[in-house]
Image (cartoon, rainbow, N blue to C red):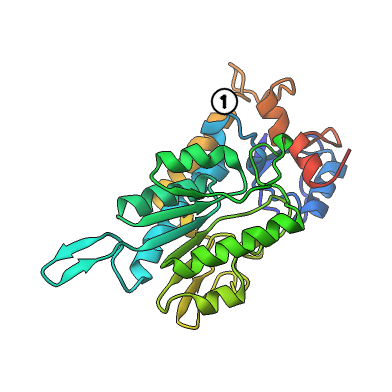
Amino acid sequence: MLLSVNPLVDEDISAFREGQVLCSVLNPTENSQWLDSVRAKGLTLLALDLVPRTTRAQSMDILSSMATVAGYKAVLDAAARLPRFFPMFMSAAGTIKPARVLILGAGVAGLQAIAVARKLGAVVEVFDVRSAVKEEVKSLGGRFIEVEGAKEDVAAGGYAVEQSEEFKKKQQELIQQRAIAADVVISTAQIPGRKAPVLILKETVNAMKPGSVIVDLAASSGGNCELTSNGNNIVVNSVSIIGKTDYPSDMSSDASKMFGSNVINLLKIMVDKEGNLALNLDDDIIKGTIAVHHKEYVGQRVKQLLNIN
């Protein structure tokens, strides 16, 4: 039996029986106590947000699907709020220069934001600590801003990792220069299990052009902008700061189709020919997705996030 649960709602697991299989978007660091109760009860939990980010698992990755939606909608939202055009215009009234967009973080959401902003005609600059995304950024028409000395970790599975204080200082200076010149900033930089890095300081916001827009997709984990208010849209010194992180809900039809497709593709490798759930722990995707099983933590990712050896 496979039951879908929400840790934020289904805090009481007393109604579940040992051996039952639960399915959830877990967020291990935020729901570690709930997860430990699930483990102690002898339940098995499939964490949809822990699906390994490998080529074979791409069709099962709900985080990538929802990030695609968020990156797309963030740019459209910014374009609607910006009091000027995105593309360059040649008109009888003169030439309108294209808008400048700065994207912080070139993960799935950031790459989608690059593609949409470029299609709308904006000049796009992109910052990311992972040099591996440089070619992807260029292929989409973005200009990659590189800060030397970034630390990368293969074991992080493609996610960004915590950087040194020296690097953060150089990063902060360069981002401030680019943000002040930008009309729109789309920030997507997050580190799983940690507070989002603060990349846009209050002083930077105060120095930005009136009418500029910041869309902070990392608002739920603290925000990349020092002034971001999660779930709220605020205006500081004539700069709009959008702390919206539920953009997929604005595209419920396609977002639901993508989510459903991800789950079905995951279940296909977990269900045998007779239609029974068969959890093969020798399969790297299944093992990585299972948070707890037989009263033990299983997936390497959940152990890493919870600092379990």
Q: Where residue 74 sits in the image (x, y, percent)?
A: 44, 59
Q: Is residue 131 visible?
A: yes
Report x, y in % for residue 284.
Answer: 69, 25
Left or right, 117 with reference to 260: left
Residue lying at the far top in this picture: please name it: 273
The furthest residue to the bottom: 237
Judge the density around disc 1: few (<14), some (14-19), many (≥20) Cα neighbours within 10 Å.
few
Q: Residue at x 59, y 77 (%)?
A: 203
Counting from the top left corner in percent of width and height, residue 103 is at: 49, 56
Q: Is residue 52 above or below residue 259?
A: above
Mark 1 element type? loop
Between 286 and 76, the one nearer to me in the picture: 76
Quadrant position of residue 22: top right
Q: Quadrant of the N terminus?
A: top right
- Image quarter where the C terminus lies is top right
> Which residue carries the number 1 mark?
56
Residue drawn where x is 39% and y is 64% of the image = 77
Q: Is residue 138 above or below residue 207?
A: above
Amino acid type at mark 1:
Arg
Q: Is residue 251 visible?
A: no
Q: Determine whether, in the image, residue 304 is placed left or right of residue 107.
A: right
**Which residue is more in the foreground, 289 or 220?**
220
Q: Nearer the viewer, residue 224 or 304?
A: 224
Residue 23 percent coordinates (x, y) = 66, 41
